[in-house]
Image (cartoon, helix red, strand yellow):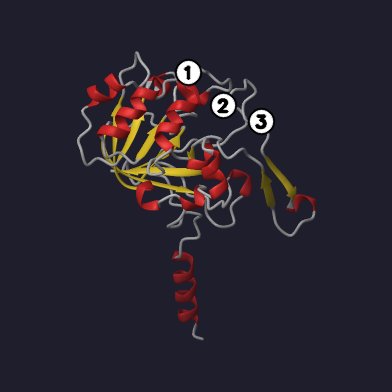
Amino acid sequence: MKPTVVLLFFFLLSSISFSHATTAYPSIPGTTSVEYGADTDALIPPRREVYGNGRIFDISHRYCTNMPAFETNDGVGEFLWLPNSMKNGSIANNSEFKLPTHTGTHVDAPGHVIDHYFDAGFDVDTLDLEVLNGPALLVDVPRDTNITAEVMKSLHIPKGVRRVLFRTLNTDRRLMFQKEFDSSYVGFMKDGAQWLVDNTDIKLVGIDYLSVAAYDDLIPSHLVFLEGREIILVEALKLDDIQPGIYSVHCLPLRLPGAEGSPIRCILIK
């Protein structure tokens, strides 16, 4: 090979980006990309809430030991382990985790509160992905009340709207960022749930704390929503700093036959 060809080859090779930024892991504007061969101790992985120049919003909460869990002040606690570690001689890192199915941002299946549905197999693997994905309306709920029939009437949600995310005082109070469970969270009262079922076309109900149902109407509201097996409940959504309006929502639960709930990753796209 001629020397000029060799030099050209190495010039072309050196022009190929060995940055860790790829299509799957894009670089962030304003940050310095890390070149191949750099000191790995300097690597800082990106953690974002917004993608695509403000077009895609991650509305799932990041799992951490101090996130709240239902009816406990201790939070979620330790849930992730690394039993196989390369530092200890394993050929690869392999983690294990253990979580209740209704932890963090999650979905409820009909078997959650209706035992004969649980026995019949109405689990998260039977939920309709068409309901969990599509146009959605993000609305702000009046901040001084639970979601009652009167509140539902006041929102004037048009017929034909099938997916609604309800942002409440829970977001303002940042309840999902507090370790201790707070039973004063905002949720649906039974009459509010019944009004939604009777007077709207809503099939996906999303809310910003661990339960869609107000604590004082915990089971009655769930029963109203889930007994028809048409409405899917997505709970503990992260709705901070997003303008109300129409988006495309995309929510995907794990395929867990036999489970009445599942962690779920949800995003909004403008």
At x 74%, y 53%, the residue is: 86
Mark 2 crowd level (few <14, some 14–19, many ≥20, 10 Å Cα): many
Which element type, helix, strand or loop, lies under badge 1? helix
Pick the quarter of the image with the C terminus: top left
Determine the residue positioned at 53% across, 18% down: 182
Categorize mark 1 by other alpha carbons within 10 Å: few (<14), some (14-19), many (20+): some
Q: What residue type is labelled 1?
A: Asp
Task: Please name the amino acid that badge 2 sits on.
Answer: Pro
Residue at mark 1 = 216
Residue that label 3 marks: 77
| Cα–Cα span, label 2 and label 1 | 19 Å
> Nearer the viewer's eye, disc 3 or disc 1?
1
Residue 76, placed above or below residue 92 = above
* Residue highlighted by disc 2: 68
SS for dot 2: loop
Q: In this view, does 225 lie to the left or right of 2?
A: left
Compute the Cα span from label 3 to label 1: 26 Å
**How far apart in space, not on screen, are marks 2 and 3 (Cα)?**
9 Å
Q: Which of marks 2 and 3 is nearer the N terminus?
A: 2
